[in-house]
Amino acid sequence: YNLVRLEMANVAADAQCNPTDISFVRAFHIIQYELTWAAATRAYGKLPSLLQRMRQRLVTELTVKRPGRHFDRVVKSKAQRYPYKKSKA
């Protein structure tokens, strides 16, 4: 979590935008994918270029339009253990 947030902050500082403009889930998936390829690479000289490509992919995610929310975020009420007693009126 902290590594992803740190990388998002670094990319946002380079792109001169807010870190909240980058989706955490998308950033996590990009970092996971790129680090998997970096681990498979035997040539350690390629690591800086792989990390640069990862940062460029994170910047391209800034331009992706995320749809707005239709409903506000709220905490759902806890499910009741027993049903409510209905009065006969």
Image: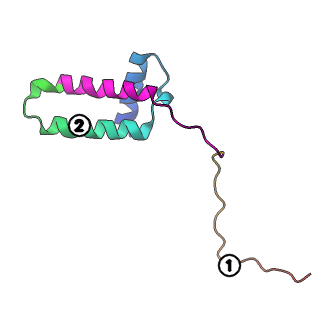
Quadrant (top left, top right, bottom left, bottom right) of the N terminus: top left
Do the residues bearing badges 1 and 2 touch, measured as CB atoms within 8 Å? Answer: no
Quadrant (top left, top right, bottom left, bottom right) of the C terminus: bottom right
First to last magenta residue range? 48-71
Query: Which residue does the image show at 10% across and 28% down from the upper left?
Result: 44
Residue 63 in picture, x, y percent from top left: 45, 26
Residue 54 on the magenta span: yes
Q: How crowded is mark 2: few (under 14 residues within 10 Å), some or many (20 or more)?
A: some
Residue 80 in picture, x, y percent from top left: 66, 71
Disc on res. 53: none
Residue 20 in picture, x, y percent from top left: 50, 30
The residue nearer to you, when weighing 69 against 76, is 69
Identify the residue position indicated by label 2 in the image.
35
Quadrant of res 81: bottom right
Identify the residue position indicated by label 1 in the image.
82
Please tell me whether residue 67 is drawn above or below residue 48 in the rendered image: below
Q: Is mark 2 on a helix, strand or loop?
A: helix
Does the rendering let one see residue 2? Answer: no
